[in-house]
Amino acid sequence: MSTVDHERHSEDLGAYLLGALPELEAQMVERHIVGCAECKAELERLQPAADVLPHAVDAYEPPPSLKRSLMEEVERDVRARGGTDAAPRPWREWLLGGALIARPRLAAAGAIAVLVLGLAVGYGADRLIRGGGGGTRTLAAHIDRRALPGGSAELAVPRHGAATLRVRGLQVLRGGRVYEVWLERAGAVSPAGALFAVAADGSGTAAIPAGLHGVARVLVTRERAGGAPQPTEPPIISFRT
């Protein structure tokens, strides 16, 4: 297995989970996973978010500013990877919270698929919570004011189902970077399966599909596209549950 083949298939994992790959490409990913422990582990990490998406909330149309901000980031990432010099390929439709958006080749499929999961579930859950879901606790955040001088965040925790993170006043990240949510249990930090971007006004929403059972803290950091196995910087947002 070459490095190029590994990178190509690893980038397609998120789209594979969402059923967004053509049949031939999906079969290629499946064959690759059989012999690649790294991609198999990444697929298992993303699976809970994919599983909860169809059942978490009703579909809602995200605001145009949020979709526009996300797609601008996708286009920047494609250009950074040399996508403008490559031969054009047919555009495919991408599902984002009930809206179909045309986009080019799956150049950053892993990152974008997880962003879609977080945005689609998170935005719908946000609408439900604002509509008055019973038994939902809202947690206030501890903010690193050096990193986010004007930022704010809150975490809505229902009795059952996905918790929902809402942020305001965050920086729009460039260079393919994303915000990643982490769960701390018994002193150990693990990915929550939630990456998110923010709209041009700094607002955003993400769902935590695994719930918060046994979680002591919820953390947010800025990471590379696709997320990281462990935080690479101190958290800029944290919640004690």
Image: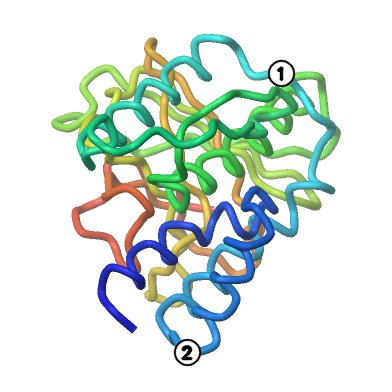
Label 1 sits on a secondary structure element that is: loop
User: Taking 238 as reference, is 129 above or below it?
Assistant: above
Left or right: 15 as drawn, with respect to 133: left
Disc 2 vs disc 1: Cβ atoms closer than 8 Å? no
Mark in the foreground, 2 or 1: 2
Q: Residue furthest left?
A: 146
- Residue at the image point whose x is 44% and y is 29% from the top: 153
User: Taking 24 as reference, is 67 above or below it?
Assistant: above
The residue under label 2 is 35
Left or right: 132 as drawn, with respect to 201: right
Residue 154 image point, x, y percent:
51, 32
Disc 2 versus disc 1: distance between alpha carbons?
A: 39 Å
**Location of residue 47 (image quadrant):** bottom right
**Rendered-image quadrant of the N terminus:** bottom left
Q: How is the image coloured?
A: rainbow
Instruction: Tell me the kind of residue under disc 2.
Output: Gly
Most foreground residue, 23 or 120: 23
**Location of residue 56 (image quadrant):** top right
Residue 198 image point, x, y percent:
42, 25
Instruction: Tell me the kind of residue under disc 1.
Output: Glu
- At label 1, counting other C-alpha atoms closer than 10 Å, the crowd grade (few under 14, some 14-19, many 20 or more) is few
- Residue at the image point whose x is 38% and y is 75% from the top: 187
Q: Residue furthest front?
A: 87
Residue 89 image point, x, y percent:
46, 37
- Residue at the image point whose x is 46% and y is 45% from the top: 106
User: Taking 80 as reference, is 108 above or below it?
Assistant: below
Left or right: 4 as drawn, with respect to 31: left
The residue under label 1 is 61
- Residue at the image point whose x is 60% and y is 75% from the top: 30
Most foreground residue, 82 or 88: 88
- At label 2, counting other C-alpha atoms closer than 10 Å, the crowd grade (few under 14, some 14-19, many 20 or more) is few
